[in-house]
Image (cartoon, rainbow, N blue to C red):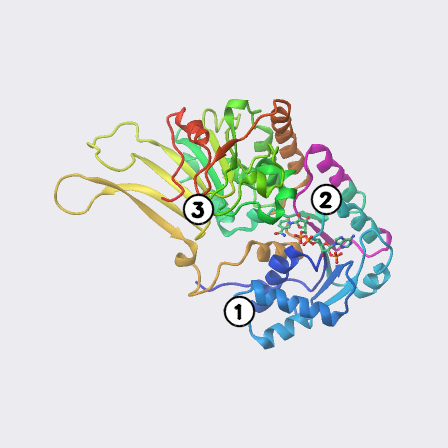
Amino acid sequence: MVSRTIPVDDFDLVLFGATGDLAARKILPSLYRRFVAGQMPESARVIGAARSKMDDKSFRKLVRDALAEFVSEAKRDKKTIDAFVAQCSYIAIDAKGEGGWEQLKEAVRDEAVKAFYFSVAPALFGPLAERLRSYGIACENSRLVVEKPFGVDLESARQLNADLAASFDEHQIYRIDHFLGKETVQNLMAVRFANVMFEPLWNSRYIDHVQITVAETVGVGGRGAYYDKSGAMRDMVQNHLMQLLCLTAMEPPNHFDADMLRDEKLKVIRALDPLTPAEIVRGQYREGPDGPSYVEDAENPESRTESFIALKIAVSNWRWKGVPFYLRTGKRMSRRLSEIVVQFKETPHSIFDRTEGSPANTLTIRLQPDEGMDLSVTIKEPGPGGMRLVNVPLDMTFADALGPQGEEIPDAYERLIMDVIRGDQTLFMRGDEVEAAWAWTDPIIEGWVERRAQPYKYAQGSSGPEEALMLMHRDGRRWRELEE
Ligand code: NAP
């Protein structure tokens, strides 16, 4: 396959929080990779901004260091890096102060797309947006990118939306959920809506249940104190897992258009039933060979915050009546894995004596590792010896099937940043979607806070607490093994 790079319009990207971790780890490397791919116009500029005082030369050194650490060696050569950093500059600005704004106004061009990336704490979103407007820096051609977390509950999300809406229109605001930038997630939509054979089966008549897993092997480590105020529900479920659920469950939009797609996702969130305590399992990892326990990492011996959560969710509409969506996510689990598993029902009647294999098809959509999909189908085992059936995967690992030899699948951030420049909001969350997700999440969290619910303990390197297994066993189902 020939990889296609569609050029984007000339742009000035102002990166607030340019000296921070996310800028170094994701944003600057992603811009560089798009530069290598020939997608970044020669006249495009990256203007770093943060409080730290430094000149362009020091900032370029910071950019070089980030690329050295976070871009693979195969993509790094001195000439290309020199050319990229020549397009980077820096202005010292305090989001809450008045210095630097006039200089920024001079630096950005009205004729280019202006993208303002807020890679800073959410408390700074409002002050930044307000100054961009009051100093006359933002215009109709401006876009604003904001990072997660978008609030910690409905009230704070509403406040953030109001702060941004005071200075920018919704069509200018890009709320990042990097899961939506993954190739697989976009492919889920392609598979569902560009093929004739899946959509007719995509309902309660043929699907038994759906599992969504986002398992991590790392603990909360250095960010324990921050994480302890959040927990897996706020950090992962309200945003990432909810988005995966929406894309799996939504009705086909009339057109692949930002608002039509987001309308359909919003309908799914609004169709989610409230959860009862029996449908929720929360856990905290114990001390283990890979590190201290959750409560030690969080530096809070009394902590009741969950580092693991499993949920059984009902989507109350015609399509999904009686089809549970099981979600789980956690830290310090046995394997780093993100996937959606669509478990089809068994054939209504089997004409074979079955000794092996499952009589039901499974579509697995893998976000990591090895982005791809596989569909398990049952066939006859080759050779003599009777009609023995086996399950085999029809494997669609994208890197193998489609990727040009040796080429990495672009990082989600690469795709998303270029979508911002193109003005395509399809893969970004709309304000009402975020609020609806919090409106569903808040009462669940309030419920366990009121009950002073204590999370179950689980072993490091496991698949979470036993009780999470029971959540499915009770229904005669089981989670897919993380190691399968
Ligand atoms: P970080 O390492 O703490 O960096 C924060 C950045 O904000 C620094 O560049 C800092 O620079 C700047 N800053 C702080 N106060 C400022 C002010 N008053 N005015 C202007 N700039 C200010 O944080 P991060 O990890 O990069 O995260 C940035 C945002 O992305 C956060 O909202 C975070 O939740 C989110 N996020 C991060 C990750 C990740 O992997 N790191 C992942 C997802 C989302 P100065 O101190 O020089 O001002």
- Horizontal arrangement in the rendering, residue 148 relative to residue 197 (left or right): right
Picture coordinates of residue 96, whole percent (x, y) = 83, 51
Q: Secondary structure at mark 3?
A: loop
Disc 1 residue crowd, few under 14, some 14–19, many 20+, Cα 10 Å: few
Decide whether residue 393 is among the magenta residues: no
**Residue beneath label 1, please?**
75
Note whether 406 is above or below 278 in the view shown.
below
Specify the farthest residue to the left. 385
The residues tagged by marks 3 and 1 sit, at their Cα atoms, a distance apart of 28 Å
Magenta part of the chain:
134-162
In the picture, the disc for residue 170 is 2
**Residue beneath label 3, please?**
335
Picture coordinates of residue 470, whole percent (x, y) = 42, 27
The residue lying toward the viewer, choosing from 332 and 363, is 332
Picture coordinates of residue 219, whole percent (x, y) = 54, 45
The residue lying toward the viewer, choosing from 286 and 191, is 286
The residue mark sitting in front, 3 or 1, is: 3
